Image (cartoon, grey):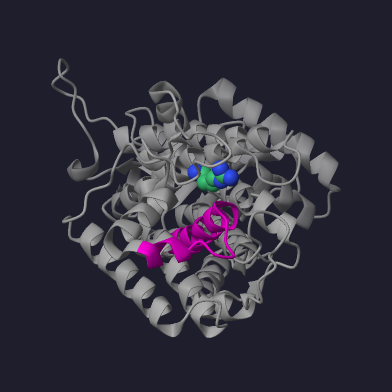
Amino acid sequence: MNKLWAGRTSGVTDSVADDFNSSIRFDCRLYREDIAGSMAHAAMLGEKGIITDAEADALIDGLQSILNDLDDGTLAFDWKAEDVHMFVEQVLTERLGEVGKKLHTARSRNDQVALDMRLHLRYESDTIANQVKDLIAAIVCVAERNKTAIMPGYTHLQRAQPILFSHHILAYAMMLLRDLGRLEDGRKRIDVSPIGACALAGTTYDTDRQFEARMLGFAAVAQNSIDAVSDRDFCVELLAALSLLMMHLSRLSEELILWTSWEFRFVTLSDAFTTGSSIMPQKKNSDMAELVRGKTGRVYGDLMALLTMLKGLPLAYDKDMQEDKEAVFDAVDTVKMCLSVFAPMLRGMTVHADVMHKAAQTGFINATDLADYLVRKGLPFRSAYKISGKLVSECIQSGCVLETLPLETYRQYSTLIEDDVYAAIDLQHCVESRISEGGTSPTSVDRQIAYIKEQIK
Ligand code: ARG
């Protein structure tokens, strides 16, 4: 194949080397960004008199026709092309002749590819942020629908203290709000224009980088041309944010998988988001949640690939950096897919308040409340803790729970205990009285819901 860069070398390359070198298989997804960047570049060249206005117009029209033809499928990608940038320029020159060859004045593929990635990720980051907002809204919807359901809260996966299910699920909304914040913060550093940095050193032409940045809607222009073409930290940041997001989704998935088991039976997922078994007729598997959990490792892998690819690179551009794309695209695709299935899966979920409540009645999850009761009667917490522990042990021996232990037995352990103990250890009361800021009380849950809604408005 005839190379646009034939010159120093014959440009005659081995076909195995061509295949190895080519990135069009995956960077073809950047064609819209590439063309938008080229249009801005052509407009700037015209504006600055580096090419004539007529030439600029011809380039812009030519680029527009390539865009239209790629969009509607009348132009197919040439899989033998080196990359999307070469492909567009090649087609442009085929269509326009000599003037097509002027587009690459005062430009390099190095600033071009950095530009394309920034434009692309600015868009994808916004898409994902909107999906995260939708997922948060779904969580709030589940919390509101099941606001008063009581469940056992766990530590070490052992029943610990009574909590509202709504409080538990809203913990994930808080995590996702931080994920959203990370996306929004990273976006600021994506939104910086590298175009005009050229190969690495800038250019001898009198260009206007601000003009190009404005046309492409960038908030700022990169201040060092070497930095502009050689770093991919904005990709790393995005993948780091996506990794954390996936970690949160994976933990929620794990809980859903547990909760949908017969051992818990706290929730049922709708048939639309579960699968059956090819051999066991009774099965209803939480495949979506399992896949989200599984795909989390994949996104971490993408982050690691990117970090490792970058760590030893001398400035400025190195071809290694072509490897950023598959990792970034894979992470973006994976996260978008996971989010698109997660929100409707949650919205269609049924919460079994009765089963949760029953689970909350065993496991002595009100033992802390019993200790707190004794503290209110005047005992220091450590002494109260000990008595409460002994009473739990007494219950286990006699096969009852704190709610059914007779008052006489209570009083054998402490004469401070009176008939009002039963009200103090009632689960509903336990939950309602956890009034500390951010606690599980219904007032706190209401406050959290209002806060979250405000944040995603
Ligand atoms: N396909 C290349 C990439 O993705 C484009 C930049 C090529 N630049 C170069 N000097 N060979 O990184």
Q: Residue at x 21, y 32 (%)?
A: 275
Front residue of 151/23: it is 23
Q: Residue at x 16, y 23 (%)?
A: 282
Q: Position of residue 65 (x, y in %)?
A: 26, 68
Q: Position of residue 387 (x, y in %)?
A: 75, 36
Give the side of residue 207 with respect to residue 223, left or right: left
Depicted 295 relative to depicted 74: above or below: above
Depicted 357 relative to depicted 257: above or below: below
Pick out the residue farthest to the top: 279
Depicted 357 relative to depicted 142: above or below: above
Give the side of residue 116 with respect to residue 88, left or right: right
Front residue of 244/367: it is 244
Kindly report the secondary structure that dominates the magenta region of the rendered protein. helix
Quadrant of the rendered image containing residue 99? bottom left
Q: Residue at x 58, y 81 (%)?
A: 211
Q: Which residues are magenta?
A: 98-127
Front residue of 448/160: it is 448
